[in-house]
Amino acid sequence: RKDEKQFINVRLQLLDQQYCLEMDRELWQSYLDIGLQQHSWPDQFYKMAKTNDFGLCKQYIMNYIENNKKQLNHCQFELTKQEQQFQTCPFKELSFE
């Protein structure tokens, strides 16, 4: 029973993290796409990148997206690992009581 609750809790945390990372990636990808199209970044990006150079700011955004992808891959790995561990657990049906 305790194992079930722990499994569900961890699973929900991982799914929440995955969702947040996916939304963040989509947002930053749209920033990148629009910035490249307009050849301009919002002022806050220049401040975050600590530069006024378009190319360096672009690299900052691309690095952010790449780091996000690594975090997302790790999260998906943890979800898969947890799912595989669940397959070997004695409890097969989880109750939400």
Image: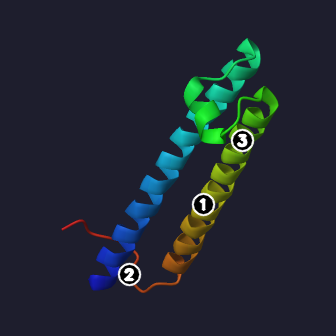
Image position, residue 60 (x, y; %): 71, 41
Q: CA distance from mark 3 to mark 1?
A: 24 Å
Q: Residue 51: x, y in percent?
A: 70, 35
Q: Residue at x 68, y 57 (%)?
A: 70
Q: Quarter of the image containing the N terminus?
A: bottom left
Spatial CA distance of label 2 from label 3 is 46 Å
Residue ID at (81%, 31%): 55
Q: Which residue is mark 2?
A: 91
Q: Secondary structure at mark 3?
A: helix
Which residue, given by chain and number where applicable, does mark 3 sit on?
Answer: 60
Please tell me which of labels 3 and 1 falls first in the chain: 3
State how the image is colored: rainbow
Q: Amino acid at mark 3?
A: Tyr
| Image position of 38 with respect to 10: above or below | above
Residue 17 screen position, x and y as percent:
47, 55
Sooner in the amino-acid sequence: mark 1 or mark 2: 1
Near mark 1 (Cα within 10 A), the count class, few <14, some 14-19 or many ≥20, is some
Residue 58 rendering spot, x and y as whole percentages = 75, 33
Residue indicated by mark 1: 76
**Within the image, what quadrant is residue 54 found in?**
top right
Q: Residue 21: which numbered mark, if any?
A: none
Say whether marks 2 and 3 touch (CB < 8 Å): no
Label 2 residue SS: loop
In the figure, 48 relative to 79: above or below? above
